Image (tube, grey):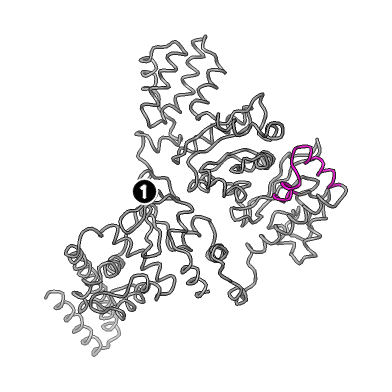
């Protein structure tokens, strides 16, 4: 595995990996961009090609190419390794052959979901009952290519067909219940039955395209609920998955925008019609974590929810959530109250113009209130203002606020001063997301990270190696914590009086975890102290060494005092005298 890691790093630079998620600008020897892991206005995310590391000094997330992929893709190290190996063409067969451990629960769950997805699709395409469902899909406007592409299938109307097939494949009843594909009414799992029966099945994939759950649509009028989703499992968390994201991700990145729809059919029909940057919220309310998946790639979010009251309320909640980020939000309005699936089926050629005509959320909300309440009645005018004020108060631009107030004054026949007075007395609810970015509350800042004195010293040695010569007589590995000792030893062994070899070569000589640690400390010192010069760096290093020595002496003193007490209690006179002398020598050293 070590060889594979080094081979991938040799073929793929940190800047090449990060650029796929973050817009970077040159900043001296490094590159900077807005952090993809938290909302920010000023860039604190630093990429160092020299060190092969990317790190945010705001939220303290990042690392080398593997750590970065783990964080941004939400995968473990092995999956990050596989993902980057695919990008670089590095073979992992040797590493896979060396793995002798049994498959963990996550791997089994992924395997069983992939197997069931194929089973459901076979039921759709090759059984008489499935053919009827296939006709239904064709009538809804989906073609065979889309059905195959999204692995849409059919769950047989049976309590046992699916789980019987899985038991024959070697999966345990306990695993099937854990997967959510089977249910039991007893405290044990002796008797189980299929969760999904007689339903149109939409496999739900994670952002890497792996099936992690299912959404099952009712096919009979009296079948409840209309939509039945997989429960939360070790691989499926509904607030963390956007339906269709693995299919739409390339277009989302290219167009720097995403279209949010509500349902599986909405997503697949719109995708087929050419809106390849579309995703769905999987029939659940939009969550912050879902927005974080698209945050690194998009500037604009289009909301294409149903035109009914529930859909409009969902659009409002979605807009409120986007205030955590710096998105431009627009609303797609469809004629005659159609949903996007119906419109895509009947008017696919008109979709690009519909997208182009999308209104900003503010303009859409403004027009909706005027249409809903009218402008004749004084009470309705007050309702319009009261409902619009939360949005108006959340705007950071005074120019935008002034423009909406001018429009209200004109349309509602009210003096601008009256609206300003009303707005001045209005307060956003404490729960409103916009309070985080208004003057009402201080922005929520990531917690600052404090590095230990020995960590900072190690960073200084790497960043200012020439100055290390001045302190070599005072430094030993005993002044460093266990995780830093190996790094210092390699540094000391390679030191030639002026420093070590090239940073990249030095880091390459360290094991993976140690190299990542050393890179981070070096980058931190470069960002914080890089411009101070060697004289100031020498002063900082002296202060740090003095602090470390004092801490070390204090620790030794406490340890000696404890040993002296024990020796005295146990009557070990010779040890007692020897320990007293050691304490005396240590105290004399401190006083010098």
Residue ranking furthest to the left: 592
Task: Tell me which segment is drawn in magenta.
Answer: 129-152
Q: What residue sits 71% from the left and 31% below the top?
A: 346
**Is 376 drawn above or below residue 202 in the view shown?**
above
Q: What residue sits 12% from the left and 74% below the top?
A: 591
Name the chief secondary structure element in magenta. Answer: helix
Residue ranking furthest to the bottom: 574
Q: Quadrant of residue 57?
A: bottom left
- Residue 501 appears at what percent x and percent y? 31, 75
Residue ranking furthest to the front: 349
Count of number-bearing discs: 1
**Is 238 drawn above or below residue 438 in the view shown?**
below
SS assignment at label 1: loop
Q: Is residue 279 left or right of residue 457?
A: right
- Residue 400 appears at what percent x and percent y? 40, 26
Q: Is residue 486 left or right of residue 295?
A: left
Q: Quadrant of the C terminus?
A: bottom left
Q: Quadrant of residue 280?
A: top right
- Residue 141 appears at what percent x and percent y? 75, 38
Magenta highlight on residue 142: yes
Of residues 287 and 12, which is closer to you in this image?
A: 12
- Residue 535 appears at what percent x and percent y? 16, 64
Q: What residue sits 20% from the left and 75% below the top?
A: 471
Residue wearing tag 1: 43
Q: What residue sits 50% from the left and 68% below the top?
A: 8
Of residues 211 and 439, which is closer to you in this image?
A: 211
Magenta highlight on residue 421: no
Of residues 362 and 253, which is closer to you in this image?
A: 253
Q: Is residue 222 left or right of residue 339?
A: right
Instruction: Characterize the local packing of mark 1: few (<14), some (14-19) or many (20 or more) Cα atoms within 10 angstroms.
Output: some
């Amino acid at each position: 595995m070590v060889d594979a890691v080094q081979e991938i790093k040799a073929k793929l630079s940190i800047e090449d990996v990060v650029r796929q998620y973050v817009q970077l600008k040159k900043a001296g020897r490094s590159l900077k961009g807005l952090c993809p892991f938290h909302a920010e206005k000023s860039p604190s995310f630093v990429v160092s090609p020299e060190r092969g590391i990317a790190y945010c000094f705001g939220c303290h997330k990042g690392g080398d190419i593997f750590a970065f992929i783990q964080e941004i893709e939400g995968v473990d190290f092995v999956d990050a390794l596989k993902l980057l190996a695919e990008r670089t063409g590095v073979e992992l067969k040797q590493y896979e052959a060396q793995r002798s451990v049994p498959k963990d629960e996550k791997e089994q769950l992924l395997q069983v979901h992939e197997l069931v997805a194929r089973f459901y699709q076979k039921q759709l395409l090759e059984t008489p009952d499935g053919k009827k469902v296939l006709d239904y899909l064709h009538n809804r406007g989906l073609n065979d290519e889309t059905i195959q592409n999204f692995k849409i299938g059919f769950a047989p109307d049976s309590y046992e067909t699916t789980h019987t097939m899985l038991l024959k494949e070697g999966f345990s009843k306990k695993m099937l219940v854990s997967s959510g594909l089977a249910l039991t009414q007893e405290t044990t799992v002796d008797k189980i039955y299929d969760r999904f029966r007689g339903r149109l099945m939409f496999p739900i994939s994670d952002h890497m395209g792996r099936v992690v759950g299912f959404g099952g649509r009712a096919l009979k009028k009296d079948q409840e609920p209309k939509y039945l989703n997989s429960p939360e499992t070790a691989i499926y968390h509904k607030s963390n998955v956007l339906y269709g994201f693995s299919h739409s991700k390339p277009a989302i990145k290219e167009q720097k925008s995403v279209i949010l729809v509500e349902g599986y059919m909405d997503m697949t029909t719109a995708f087929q019609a050419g809106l390849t940057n579309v995703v769905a919220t999987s029939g659940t309310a939009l969550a912050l974590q879902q927005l974080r998946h698209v945050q690194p790639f998009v500037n604009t979010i289009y909301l294409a929810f149903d035109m009914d009251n529930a859909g409009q309320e969902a659009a409002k909640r979605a807009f409120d959530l986007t205030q955590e980020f710096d998105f431009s939000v627009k609303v797609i309005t469809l004629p005659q109250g159609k949903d996007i699936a119906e419109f895509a089926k009947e008017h696919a050629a008109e979709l690009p113009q519909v997208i182009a005509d999308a209104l900003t959320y503010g303009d859409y909300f403004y027009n909706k209130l005027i249409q809903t309440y009218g402008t004749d009645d004084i009470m309705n005018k007050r309702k319009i203002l009261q409902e619009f004020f939360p949005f108006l108060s959340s705007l950071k631009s005074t120019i935008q606020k002034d423009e909406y107030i001018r429009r209200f004054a004109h349309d509602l026949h009210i003096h601008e001063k009256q609206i300003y007075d009303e707005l001045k007395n209005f307060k956003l609810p404490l729960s409103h997301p916009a309070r985080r970015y208004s003057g009402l509350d201080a922005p929520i800042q990531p917690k600052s990270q404090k590095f230990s004195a020995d960590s900072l010293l190690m960073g200084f040695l790497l960043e200012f190696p020439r100055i290390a010569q001045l302190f070599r007589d005072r430094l030993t590995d005993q002044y460093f914590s266990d995780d830093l000792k190996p790094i210092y030893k390699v540094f000391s062994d390679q030191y030639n009086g002026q420093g070590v070899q090239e940073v990249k070569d030095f880091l390459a000589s360290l094991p993976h975890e140690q190299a990542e640690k050393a890179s981070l400390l070096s980058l931190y010192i470069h960002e914080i102290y890089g411009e101070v010069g060697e004289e100031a760096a020498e002063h900082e290093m002296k202060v740090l060494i003095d602090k470390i020595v004092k801490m070390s002496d204090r620790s030794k003193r406490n340890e000696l005092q404890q040993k002296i007490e024990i020796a005295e209690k146990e009557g070990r006179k010779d040890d007692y005298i020897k320990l007293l002398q050691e304490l005396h020598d240590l105290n004399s050293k401190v006083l010098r």
